[in-house]
Image (cartoon, helix red, strand yellow):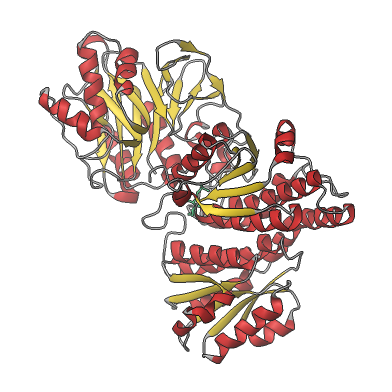
Amino acid sequence: MCGIIAVTGVEDPLSTLLEGLELLEYRGYDSAGIALVTGEGDEAGLFRLRSAVRAQSIAELARLGAGAPRGRAGLGHTRWATHGAPTEENAHPHLDCTGRVAVVHNGIIENHRELAAKLDAAGHRRTSATDSEVVAHLVEAELETGADLLEAVRRSAAVLRGDYALAISYAGEPDTLVATRRTSPLIIGRTERAGVVASDIAAVLGTTRELYALGDGEIAVVRPGSLEVVDAAGEPVEPSPLRVAWGVQAARRDGYEDFMSKEIHEQPRALADTLLERVLPEGTTELEELAAFEDELRRVERVVVVACGSSFHAGEIGRLALERWAKLPATAEIASEFRYREPVLDDRTLVVAISQSGETVDTYHALAEAARRGARTMAITNVVDSLMAREADAVIYTRAGPEIGVASTKCHVAQIILFQVFALHLARLRGSLGEDELARLAREIEALPGLVAEALGRSDEYAAVAARLAEVNDVFFLGRNVGYPVALEGALKLKELAYVRAEAYAAGEMKHGPISLIDRHAVAVVVANRGALWPKLLANIEEIKARGATVVAVTDEGDEETGRLADHVLEVPATDELLAPVVSVVPLQVLAYSVAKARGNDVDRPRNLAKVVTVE
Ligand code: M6R
């Protein structure tokens, strides 16, 4: 969703802003803009360019920027429309009435109507339909009272309600950027001569690795080579440094046709890195980050997982492992529903938020709500020091590297494996599994990166099956037990990438209604790894076949019995029943990818979707 980049003190602000915008575009956007502060003293002013030609907007800015005056500092923004259509007028940066204040905003100003009415009554002229523009006019009004930019922003932020990250430039203080945030994240970077503000680590790594995460309600004043941070009351605070394990190269395509294929092929590495020094062959699990949290974990009587999309599917798989191995009652809930219920929680309930970005607004608020209700909280995320990492009592990180493709692949499998390690960890703490079983599972988990690499070695076979499905418009995904969340994930991937209507069912539910949709035009993808319910799944396949549907089965290698029933097979290496999702999701990713490509779709930026969902 919206992305922010702001720079000061760099050699060529326009090019740095454009590079930053390109690194932010994966978040999803439909318009973009930049504002440069130009000139000196009385001559200082703002030069603004905006474009709303959707995915071409950044290229359009680069073209228009060829004749731009040299800037001293500047703001850039990618917008994913929420309030107001994706038009040039609504694209950021927004200016005040004097054209000397520029604002970029990520999030939602909930009380913008009330503020706009007051500003309109005071004679301000707004030119967009956005909630964001009010901020430029609020700052303008404060500057008119004689405040400097920091004070003007501090006072303006005090009247805002909602979630926001803001970066602001003012021609009266041409080298200064002021930034503030509530809920939506902001990162500040510094070098000896420059300063940068961004909503996303990916956008700043090309400039500096000296990074700071701005705290909730804090205000940063960034000047070339200097950074000052104050709290909402204006009192100085120490900026909090941010650790980043990867470089800017990790956020590039590296010779692959698209980020999604790169990320699919990075899965063995993502899994191996996530496991590194966390599972030892004798069954010992080392989750260093949880060392200080172990007493709390021993007291836990129930686990509730909250997440959205693919992360929710990982949670569904994880909670089954918790039940079976750690013998703990565990449920997984869609974060956007959970946050508005009245969940009954106590200090013996552990609420685990799973999120690749650590920023998804629904999951973040579900986590915060759980904490308010007295639960212990933990985050599983890929982004170090992200919002959820900071909010939770404890955090464990997947180490998948940056995921740029909108469809989650390597982060999804890393979430599953990390949750399984966590479940094993709890099983050991609670003494719910014997030493032999712990050691067996540990060995099986350690083998998973290799098995995923083997599955990827079969990508051409998976793509060949996909080629036969390129024209279908309705697909059912079926599974049982741990295969059901894999079916959910397969259906989500096909929907979001190939725009094919795909529904997932727990196979046992088919007879309770959905089977009436099955006829000879239907295609059913069945996740049929061998497990306790495998014989029942074969019976479900028979029922579907009897009604004329085409069956594609994900099977364990060498499983001829299932192979004989299915029309097409997607073979994967066999592993323990509960670990199988890490491997069996791979052919479903390749299937969705291949069907999407065959239909000419942009797999990295599917229509209507954003990588990071920062609004409700
Ligand atoms: O960053 P998160 O893991 O919290 O994101 C959650 C979902 O938005 C995400 O998994 C989404 O469903 C992906 N597009 C799935 O591929």
**Along the line of sight, the residue nearer the viewer: 603 or 438:** 438
The picture places residue 346, in percent across and down from the top left corner, at: 59, 40
Q: In which quarter of the image is residue 247?
A: top right
The reply, left or right, for residue 296 in relation to residue 281 is: left
Describe residue 575's horizontal placement relative to residue 331 as left or right. right
Q: Measuring 59% from the left and 79% from the top, which residue is drawn there?
A: 552
Residue at the top extreme, as displayed:
146
Foreground: 87 or 73? Answer: 87
Q: Quadrant of the N terminus?
A: top left
Residue 439 visible in the current orientation: yes
Q: Using residue 316 as the reference point, say whether residue 61 is left or right of it.
A: left
* 168 shown above or below 150: below
The residue that appears at 72% across and 84% down in the rendered structure is: 561
Residue 358 location (% of width, % of height): 53, 40
Q: Is residue 269 visible?
A: no
* 39, 576: nearer the viewer: 576
> How many numbered badges does the structure rendering display?
0
Residue, x 63% and y 48% (percent of image)?
A: 303
Please tell me which residue lies in front, 539 or 210.
Answer: 539
The quadrant holding residue 314 is bottom right
Q: Which residue is found at the position 74% from the left and 40% from the top?
A: 298
Percent position of residue 536, x then y = 67, 80
Where residue 154 appears, as percent x and y from the top left, is: 34, 17
Q: Considering only vertical position in the picture, is 16 above or below 425?
A: above
Q: Is residue 328 left or right of residue 9?
A: right
Would you place residue 472 above or below residue 67 in this image?
below
Check the image and report above or below for 232 versus 498: above
